[in-house]
Amino acid sequence: MGRVLWGAVLVALYLFLLAPILVVLVESFDNATYLRFPPEGFTFDAYRQVFGNAAFRTGVQVSAVTAAATALLALVAGVPAALALTRLRFRGRAAVEAAFLSPLLVPHIVLGLALLLILAPIPLTDTYPGLIVAHLGVTVPYVVRTVSAALASADPRAEEAARTLGASGFTAFRRITLPVIRPGLFSGGVIAFLLSFDETVISLFVSGQNTVPLPVAILQYVEYRSDPSVASLSVLLVLLSVVVVVAVERGIGLRRSLRSG
């Protein structure tokens, strides 16, 4: 009886979590010119409208370029930081670690305003570099966390032994430590990419007419319209996340990646 009860609870929980996605999925095929539920017709017109919308196409391009660059630079900045915080012992280490993780505790609207005040005079607002710098503030902490967790499972003595046998520091890291932390690198990079691609609040502050990421383009669209194309675009964004997760699963194993991250 207990097993049946727990099974029912798990099913109810899954339905609760999946219900919003299912509602949006069903609504994306409605043939109305406005949002309604339940839908009263079936058509692919909303998807055709999404692919035919120039603002959405441009938004996808801006978000993809920004997210890819942000993920790469977040790894470039986060891996050395994680190595330093994990391997080195120095005065103020706890304060430095807290500084790296502090963006996770600050509301994004506060970060967005601060970044606007910093980037506007340079000027870097409404530019790709400005968007990337802004997104790094909220993605680097995740990379530091995932890589630090992966480094915790790597034995530094093996790397020291390799250096004792004549290997350079870089060679020892590449041959000994890197294979161990690779799942953490993948998970950190994937998280950084998805966070950057989906970032809305900070992008609102630092983007402009020339660099409108997809989340901002969606907000601008729904400000004046409310039709099933919004639902169809939401479904496509969910599919993007699923594709990325499946790619990680097939490449290194999602469970291993998450355990390391």
Image (cartoon, rainbow, N blue to C red):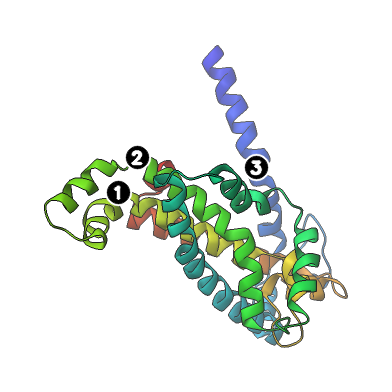
Q: Which residue is mark 3?
A: 17
In front of the other: 243 or 172: 172
Disc 1 residue crowd, few under 14, some 14–19, many 20+, Cα 10 Å: some
Q: Amino acid at mark 3?
A: Leu
Question: Could you tell me which secondary element the residue under label 1 belongs to?
Answer: helix
- Tell me: 161 left or right of 100: left
In front of the other: 83 or 58: 83
Q: Amino acid at mark 2?
A: Ser
Question: Could you tell me which secondary element the residue under label 3 belongs to?
Answer: helix
Q: Which label's residue is closer to the chain start, 2 or 3?
A: 3
Residue most extreme to the right = 224
Query: Alpha carbon of mark 2 to alpha carbon of mark 1: how far?
Result: 8 Å
Image quadrant holding the N terminus, namely top right
Contact (CB < 8 A) between labels 2 and 1?
yes
Disc number lying in front (2 or 3):
2
- Tell me: 17 left or right of 92: right
Q: Which residue is mark 1?
A: 180
Q: Which residue is mark 2?
A: 153
- Tell me: 26 left or right of 239: right
- To which quarter of the image does residue 50 belong? bottom right
Image coords of residue 243 (percent x, y) = 47, 62
Residue at image position (75%, 58%) is: 108
Query: Alpha carbon of mark 3 to alpha carbon of mark 1: how far?
Result: 34 Å
Q: Amino acid at mark 1?
A: Val
Image coords of residue 136 (percent x, y) = 60, 65
Vertical order, 36 against 257 (above or below): below
Contact (CB < 8 A) between labels 3 and 1?
no
> In the rendered image, is residue 167 in sight?
yes
